[in-house]
Amino acid sequence: NNDLNPVWNEHFEFIVEDATTQHLVVKIYDDEGIQASELIGCAQIKLKDLVPGKVKDVWLKLVKDLEIQRDNKYRGQ
């Protein structure tokens, strides 16, 4: 909340059907309370790059849109 360098120490569990083809998509929003949350950026990681049951600390470069890579603006990681 109101932090320019937030840290999420979160734990998530997912059911994976096919780790060779599926991706984990992360979308980061700026929550301004009353106003609609604004998308800061998104990123994805291939599930085949993760090992079940193992913690992996990763930094992902945020982009505006996963489909269109024209935007070169730095959105964080």
Image (spheres, rainbow, N blue to C red):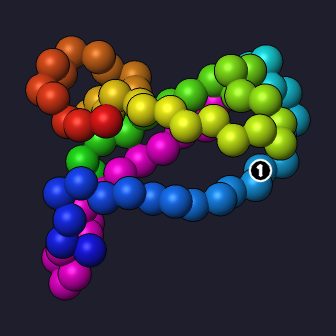
Residue at x-position 64% and y-position 30%:
23
Rendering quarter of residue 52: top right
Is residue 38 something that shows in the picture?
no
Q: Write down the residue under mark 1.
A: 14
x and y percentages locating residue 77 in the rendered image:
31, 36
Using a 10 Å C-alpha cutoff, classify the residue at mark 1 as few (fewer than 14 neighbours), some (14 to 19) or many (20 or more).
few
Query: Callout 1, which amino acid?
Result: Phe
x and y percentages locating residue 47 in the rendered image:
70, 28
The magenta stretch spans residue 31: yes
**Left or right of 76, for residue 26:** right
* Above/below status of 26 relative to 74: below
x and y percentages locating residue 2 in the rendered image:
18, 71
**Left or right of 33, for residue 73:** left
The magenta stretch spans residue 33: yes
Element class at badge 1: loop
Picture quarter with the N terminus: bottom left
Rendering quarter of residue 71: top left
Q: Which residue extends farthest left?
A: 73
Q: Which residue extends farthest right?
A: 17
Along the line of sight, the residue nearer the viewer: 25 or 50: 50
Rendering quarter of residue 75: top left
Residue at x-position 34% and y-position 28%:
61
Q: Which residues are magenta?
A: 22-37
Is residue 73 something that shows in the picture?
yes
